[in-house]
């Protein structure tokens, strides 16, 4: 049987079109390769409320900011002081900040919930909620750090009496990062023998002085340095209290000269 040119062309186009349907996925059903997907997406959340430590008042517009894999995830409290921060990786300890104007920034590690089914080859995580209620302290306390020494040292740190004497030239740091607050400040005192640090959280009654106040060695000339030191309150106590709207005082005493 002879095919006319028009019929031949039609059959050719139909054949090529059918091949195209197969190539582009519109032909036969794909073969099942038995590939299983596991649900390992972030599935945890932090929920809670933020209050004023002194009054218990719920605080609106406080920011909750969490560090996740080198980036940040954040939310704010609503008009009722409540928050819900989702999309977090399960079973993780996450560095978390709680921030609001007029209050000391809280810094802590919060752990996300760890709910999963381990029956398969890989664990399948399910949504989990960790409740974290926060009480923020106002940042209206101050701390004055007085620097003294109780020995002669080198050519510029000279003079000694039975009682400690004032010492200039120190570099003083107050750091609260190890006790739950995002606060770290340093003052180079120069010719002064004291410095005052402001915007500290209060009330707090139990900061160990040597945990939060640090100083560096002082070059006293002649190759000698004031080095070893202690930090106390008046009367020799080792802890300092901070009060709202007030200034507390601690004393640094250098006690050794090296080499």
Image (spheres, rainbow, N blue to C red):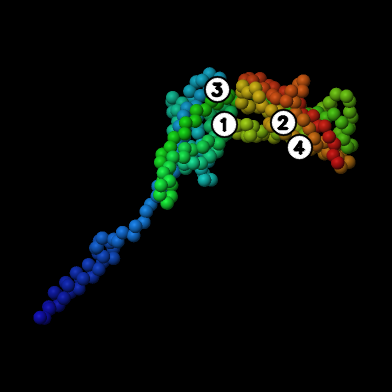
Crowd band around label 4 with a 10 angstrom C-alpha radius: few (<14), some (14–19), many (20+): some
Front label number (2 vs 4)? 2
Alpha carbons under labels 4 and 1: distance apart: 26 Å
- Residue found 67% across the figure and 22% down from its top: 241
For marks 1 and 3, the one nearer the N-term is 3
Q: Quadrant of the N terminus?
A: bottom left
**Pointer 1 with pointer 2, Cβ within 8 A:** no
The count of marks equals: 4
Q: Do residues under tags 2 and 4 come within 8 Å of each other at their CB atoms?
A: no
Dot 4 or dot 1, earlier in sequence: 1
Residue at 51% over, 37% down: 111
Say few, some or many: other residues with alpha carbon within 10 Å of mark 3 (under 14 / 14 to 19 / 20 or more).
some
Q: Which residue is mark 1?
A: 106
Task: Kindly check if marks 2 and 3 are in contact, taking CB atoms under 8 A apart as contact.
Answer: no
Instruction: Check disc 3 and report its element: helix, strand or loop.
Output: loop
Residue at the left extreme of this rendering? 1
- List the residue tagged with mark 3: 53
The percent coordinates of residue 118 (x first, y second) are: 43, 46
Residue 131 position, x and y percent, is: 47, 31
Distance between the alpha carbons at the discs numbered 2 and 4: 13 Å
- Badge 2 crowding class, 10 Å Cα cut-off, few under 14, some 14 to 19, many 20 or more, is some
Q: Tags 1 and 3 in contact by the CB under 8 Å rule? A: no
Which residue shows up at 42% across the image and 51% down it? Answer: 121
Where is residue 251 shown, x and y percent of the image?
76, 26
Q: Nearer the viewer, mark 2 or mark 3?
A: 2
As helix, strand or loop, the secondary structure at mark 2 comes to: helix
Q: Which mark is residue 210?
A: 2
Q: Nearer the viewer, residue 191 or 84?
A: 84
Of mark 2 and mark 3, the one earlier in the sequence is 3
Residue 216 badge:
4
First in sequence: mark 3 vs mark 4: 3
* Residue at the front extreme of this rendering: 119
């Amino acid at each position: 049987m002879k095919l006319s040119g028009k019929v031949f062309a039609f059959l050719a186009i139909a054949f090529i079109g059918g091949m195209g349907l197969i190539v582009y996925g519109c032909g036969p059903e794909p073969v099942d390769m038995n590939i299983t997907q596991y649900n390992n997406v972030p599935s945890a959340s932090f929920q809670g409320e933020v209050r004023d430590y002194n009054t218990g008042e719920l605080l609106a517009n406080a920011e909750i900011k969490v560090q996740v894999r080198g980036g940040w995830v954040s939310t704010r409290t609503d008009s009722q002081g409540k928050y819900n921060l989702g999309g977090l990786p399960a079973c993780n300890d996450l560095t978390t900040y709680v921030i609001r104007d007029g209050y000391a920034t809280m810094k802590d590690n919060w752990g996300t919930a760890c709910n999963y089914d381990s029956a398969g080859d890989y664990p399948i995580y399910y949504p989990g909620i960790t409740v974290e209620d926060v009480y923020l302290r106002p940042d209206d306390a101050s701390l004055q750090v007085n620097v003294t020494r109780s020995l002669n040292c080198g050519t510029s740190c000279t003079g000694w009496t039975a009682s400690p004497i004032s010492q200039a030239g120190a570099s003083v740091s107050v750091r609260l990062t190890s006790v739950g607050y995002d606060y770290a400040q340093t003052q180079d005192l120069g010719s002064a023998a004291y410095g005052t640090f402001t915007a500290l959280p209060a009330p707090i009654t139990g900061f160990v002085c040597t945990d939060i106040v640090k100083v560096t060695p002082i070059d006293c000339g002649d190759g000698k340095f004031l080095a070893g030191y202690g930090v106390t309150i008046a009367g020799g106590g080792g802890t300092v209290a901070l009060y709202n709207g007030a200034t507390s005082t601690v004393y640094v005493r250098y006690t050794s000269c090296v080499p």
